[in-house]
Amino acid sequence: MTSGSPTADVKNADVPWDAFDPDEYIKRNYIEIQPVDREILSRVRDHFRDHFQGRAGRVAAGIDVGAGPNLYPALAMLPWCDRITLLERSARNLDYLDGQLAGYDANWDQFWDVLREQPEYADLGMDPRPRFKEAVGKPVAGSLFDLCGKDERWDLGTMFFVAESITTSLDEFRRGVGCFMSALNPGSPFAAAFMEHSEGYRVGSHEFPARDIDADEVRSVLKDYTEGVTIHRMANPKQLVRTGYTGMILACGRRKV
Ligand SMILES: C[S@@+](CC[C@H](N)C(=O)[O-])C[C@H]1O[C@@H](n2cnc3c(N)ncnc32)[C@H](O)[C@@H]1O
């Protein structure tokens, strides 16, 4: 057995996030809807619907943290809140999001088709682009970690493949989840998705770090902040689309009152 010093963590601040190539990422993940994203989206849709059904009007504000070049969390929030903040750290991803506001690309229609299986989504029509443009203001440049200690709060939140996919540090992973939670008003519903046992991931020619976590870690980190949480694990036996991980974990619940 060889001995040696343990490998140092790759911290979020050490990573060149502006090298994240949104086109490559979309080509790999979102050009065609994958069964696992269909399942995640259906569960998130039903979670938000169960929460808001029968309540009058929309809540004020939703936030998708670390939005990257993924519009489906924002689409899932569309019927339920007046405004949606897309918070993102990478300049290239912010440019991508900005470019989608006037009329987003056709690949996102497959994701809307899943959402509009429920009437509150269908009521927004076959093409929710005008409502998307109205709800999603200019994407906001910023860091998940800066949500801690800020006064601003949101009434609905999503964070997909972020806290564990921006660092190898367990401490930063936990802090990231905590900062997401601290941005939500008490009682707010949320959905958060995580890669399970990820070894990191490549986007174009760049490698990005990930913290290896599992459902027990997700359950444990959420415990103090949340109530009514359900956790679903979706295995990825073929590892066809995104390699170097064993599955995905979806947590749906409410911010503790
Ligand atoms: C694996 S991608 C996930 C993107 C998207 N949410 C999705 O569902 O595909 C991780 C994203 O987190 C962003 N990111 C990295 N560090 C961040 C930070 N400190 N605050 C907010 N976003 C960050 C990256 O730029 C990237 O868009």
Image (tube, rainbow, N blue to C red):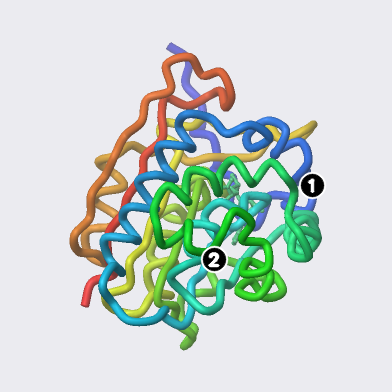
The spot of residue 101 in percent (x, y) is: 74, 64
**Could you tell me which residue is drawn at 57 percent across and 34 percent down?**
33
The spot of residue 164 in percent (x, y) is: 47, 46
* Horizontal arrangement in the rendering, residue 207 relative to residue 40 (left or right): right
Q: Residue furthest bottom?
A: 151
The spot of residue 109 in percent (x, y) is: 63, 45
Q: Nearer the viewer, residue 66 or 81?
A: 81
Q: Which residue is mark 1?
A: 19
**Could you tell me which residue is drawn at 55 percent across and 41 percent down?**
8
Q: Nearer the viewer, residue 77 or 21?
A: 77
Please tell me how crowded label 1 is: few (under 14), some (14-19), or many (20+) other residues with Cα within 10 Å.
some
Q: Which residue is mark 2?
A: 144
Disc 2 residue type?
Answer: Leu
- Height in image: 147 above or below 1? below
**Could you tell me which residue is drawn at 49 percent across and 50 percent down?**
160
Disc 1 residue type?
Answer: Ala
Element at badge 2?
Answer: helix
Q: Nearer the viewer, residue 169 or 29?
A: 29
CB contact under 8 Å: marks 2 and 1: no
- Height in image: 128 above or below 152? above
What's the CA distance linking mark 2 and mark 1? 18 Å
Element at badge 1?
Answer: helix
**Could you tell me which residue is drawn at 61 percent across and 61 percent down?**
128
**Picture quarter containing residue 226?**
bottom left
Q: Is mark 2 within 8 Å of ligand 1?
A: yes
Please tell me how crowded label 2 is: few (under 14), some (14-19), or many (20+) other residues with Cα within 10 Å.
many
